[in-house]
């Protein structure tokens, strides 16, 4: 009955989350309120980083010799934006609301230098894309795909810096630059006020070798390749702009406004439309059904078997009859013997509680819509801040266990909780940052941001860990439900399938199986620069993960105790934590099969970040398994009558 109860509750939670996710679109979130524009209002188009899925190294827009404003002004950035490598700056592109413009000249570069030509060529070779922003909407290239026989419009983020093509058939491929942009801006008009809201920002890039009559007039330039007065427009049939030393390049753009029925609250829908969504939904539901079925079966078996064991043991009348019993009941005098390296276990569990709390609260905020993609870097900022704040619970839970294990030096234990995991992450992060800095990428975190991270760590997280640890150690220690024998019981020889390494590796399969389908979409979002916003289903998958980690650990812990092996403390932590091994292995498989990364630095970057993610996953899932097993063991031994 317990399994069906869990399954029923999870289904109710699923529908509730989907309802909340839909309802959350009905109100405007703080910081992303709509902006109304009157006719002829001037809007400055902003430029963002250059990004590539081949290198994973973002670069500043003005690292290439594009037309520069004077001065270049950085927009306000949050911590998450900086860590993502976003560098949002002003540009010379100016747009007047609801005013179509043709062949507007941005600037002319008289002749690119060898180094500039090399920069353009390298970015084109690495398939870099230019990102721009208008009214907080990222620019996108329109891609039409069919769904159930109907065309569906989706966006591909940014546009390529250029492309490579052969001038003659079979000849050498030359690099060409996209120097003409055709912006299509979708707007929704209020009938009563005649004000407009931007609901779409599309671009079509062109490469064209512009021609003009000499001399060049910088005030009122007139081009022969495109002229609005003569109804001449840029097409893909014109001679393209080659990238070569000494080439003269003229940057131009068109602006087309189109009225749209899309309302402002729904303007992100096209950006968030994920590819293969039918496969995605089916896979999630399929995973949900399989894991819930397994969990229900496991729970029923466990409850029936335990109920029979406890009833039978409590009905035994004599000590001789009790001596004849075997299994978990025999090791009651050793089941709560403190484990070896108990201090290290409490440190890992404290950090696991910290990560678990951060994940739960972040997902709740995301489901409610507070971490909208319109708020760039919001997710990263929220995770860092919540991790620092959850230090309070890390210190408390670690200290409670440390005292139960009869630990004395709680201050030393607290220091380990506060510094061990963050130190590992910081060392890896700093090493990767040096590599990125060596590549002169905008993804390198500046020292001002490093100072902010240190403040979060030393100014917020560490003091909260000590406060939580103080109150946790101050409380009386948890009392064991049974007395522990003075002399440890000898553990009989175990069957091969109960070997710690084998059972731990087997135990990690099921939790990983609950999340690996969703993991594919998360990795695609991270490394192929796609939007991810299915937080409702992600929360459901996370709930499945928690239930699966708890139940598989309880089952294996029960089998371990039945074979009279009472060393369950570390085993329970490592059983569900072993799912991180499969996570890292899957991320390696994803790297070699789905990504086209060739640079060594980019590969090191990928595996460095995935190691951090896997380590965090190990601590979090291990903590879930440990506390599930801890409560289970305390419950079953408290239910047994022992003289």
Image (cartoon, rainbow, N blue to C red):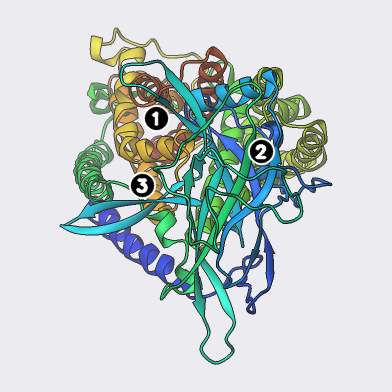
Q: Nearer the viewer, residue 100 or 146?
A: 100
Please state which of the two labelled residues, at mark 2 or mark 3, is closer to the viewer.
2
Kindly identify the residue that appears in the image at 82 percent across and 35 percent down. 451
Q: Indicate the quadrant where residue 66 lies.
A: top right
Question: Residue 388: x and y, percent?
Answer: 70, 42
Question: Residue 90: x and y, percent?
Answer: 73, 51
Q: Nearer the viewer, residue 477 or 401?
A: 401
Q: Is residue 260 visible?
A: yes
Question: Residue 572: x and y, percent?
Answer: 42, 27
The reply to whether callout 3 and callout 1 are in contact (CB within 8 Å) is no
Going from N to C along the chain, the mark reached first, 3 or 1, is: 3
Q: Which residue is disc 3 drawn over?
A: 541
Circle 3 packing at 10 Å, graded few (<14), some (14-19), many (20+), is: many
Going from N to C along the chain, the mark reached first, 2 or 3, is: 2
Q: Given the current orientation, which residue lies at the most extreme left position? A: 149
Question: Residue 188: x and y, percent?
Answer: 49, 76
Which image quarter holds the C terminus? top left
Q: Indicate the quadrant where residue 39 lies.
A: bottom right
Q: Is residue 261 left or right of residue 121?
A: left
Up the image or down, 140 lies above or below 422; here it is below
Report the disc number at residue 61: 2
């Amino acid at each position: 009955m317990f399994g069906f109860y869990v399954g029923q509750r999870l289904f109710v939670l699923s529908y509730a989350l989907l309802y909340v996710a839909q309802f959350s679109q009905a109100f405007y979130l703080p910081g992303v309120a709509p902006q109304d524009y009157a006719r002829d209002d001037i809007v400055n188009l902003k430029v963002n980083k250059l990004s590539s899925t081949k290198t994973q190294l973002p670069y500043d827009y003005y690292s290439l010799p594009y037309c520069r404003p004077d001065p270049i002004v950085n927009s306000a950035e949050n911590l998450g934006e900086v860590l993502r490598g976003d560098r949002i700056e002003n540009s010379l592109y100016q747009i007047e609301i609801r005013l179509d413009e043709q062949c507007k000249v941005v600037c002319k570069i008289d002749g690119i230098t060898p180094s500039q030509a090399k920069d353009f060529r390298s970015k084109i070779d690495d398939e870099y894309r230019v990102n721009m922003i208008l009214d907080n909407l990222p620019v996108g290239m329109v891609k039409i795909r069919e769904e159930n026989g109907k065309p569906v419009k989706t966006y591909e983020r940014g546009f390529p810096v250029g492309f490579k093509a052969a001038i003659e058939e079979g000849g050498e491929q030359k690099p060409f630059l996209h120097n003409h942009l055709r912006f299509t801006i979708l707007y929704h008009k209020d009938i009563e006020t005649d004000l407009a809201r931007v609901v779409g920002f599309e671009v079509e890039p062109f490469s064209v070798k512009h021609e003009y009559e000499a001399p060049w007039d910088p005030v009122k330039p007139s081009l022969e390749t495109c002229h609005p007065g003569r109804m001449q427009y840029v097409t893909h049939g014109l001679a393209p702009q080659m990238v070569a030393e000494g080439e003269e390049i003229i940057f131009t753009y068109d602006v087309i406004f189109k009225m749209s029925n899309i309302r402002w609250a729904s303007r992100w829908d096209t950006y968030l439309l994920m590819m293969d969504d039918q496969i995605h939904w089916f896979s999630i539901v399929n995973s949900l059904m399989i894991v819930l079925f397994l969990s229900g079966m496991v729970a029923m078996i466990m409850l029936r078997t335990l109920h029979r064991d406890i009833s039978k043991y409590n009905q035994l009348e004599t000590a001789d009859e009790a001596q004849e019993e075997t299994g978990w009941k025999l090791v009651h005098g050793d089941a709560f013997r403190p484990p070896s390296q108990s201090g290290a276990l409490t440190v890992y569990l404290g950090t696991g509680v910290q990560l678990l709390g951060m994940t739960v609260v972040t997902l709740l905020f995301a489901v409610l819509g507070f971490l909208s993609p319109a708020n760039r870097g919001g997710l990263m900022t929220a995770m860092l801040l919540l991790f620092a704040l959850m230090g309070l619970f890390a210190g408390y839970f670690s200290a409670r266990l440390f005292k139960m294990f009869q630990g004395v030096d709680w201050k030393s234990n607290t220091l380990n909780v506060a510094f061990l995991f963050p130190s590992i992450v910081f060392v890896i992060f700093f090493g990767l940052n040096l590599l990125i800095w060596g590549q002169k990428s905008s993804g390198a975190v500046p020292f001002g941001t490093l100072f902010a991270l240190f403040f979060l760590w030393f100014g917020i997280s560490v003091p909260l860990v000590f406060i939580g640890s103080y109150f946790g150690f101050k409380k009386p220690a948890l009392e064991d439900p049974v007395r522990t024998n003075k002399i440890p019981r000898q553990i009989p020889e175990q069957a091969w399938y109960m070997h710690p390494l084998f059972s731990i590796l087997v135990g990690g399969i099921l939790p990983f199986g609950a999340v690996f389908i969703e993991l594919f979409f998360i990795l695609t979002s991270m490394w192929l620069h796609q939007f991810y916003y299915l937080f409702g289903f992600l929360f459901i998958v996370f709930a499945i993960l928690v239930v699966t980690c708890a139940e598989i650990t309880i089952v294996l812990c029960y089998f371990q105790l039945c074979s009279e092996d009472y060393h369950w403390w570390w085993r329970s932590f490592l059983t569900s934590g072993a799912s991180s091994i499969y996570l890292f292995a899957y991320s390696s498989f994803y790297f070699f099969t789905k990504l086209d990364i060739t640079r060594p630095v980019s590969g090191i970057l990928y595996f460095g970040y995935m190691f951090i993610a896997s380590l965090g996953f190990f601590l979090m899932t291990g903590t879930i398994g440990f506390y599930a097993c801890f409560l289970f063991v305390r419950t079953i031994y408290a239910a047994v009558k022992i003289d």
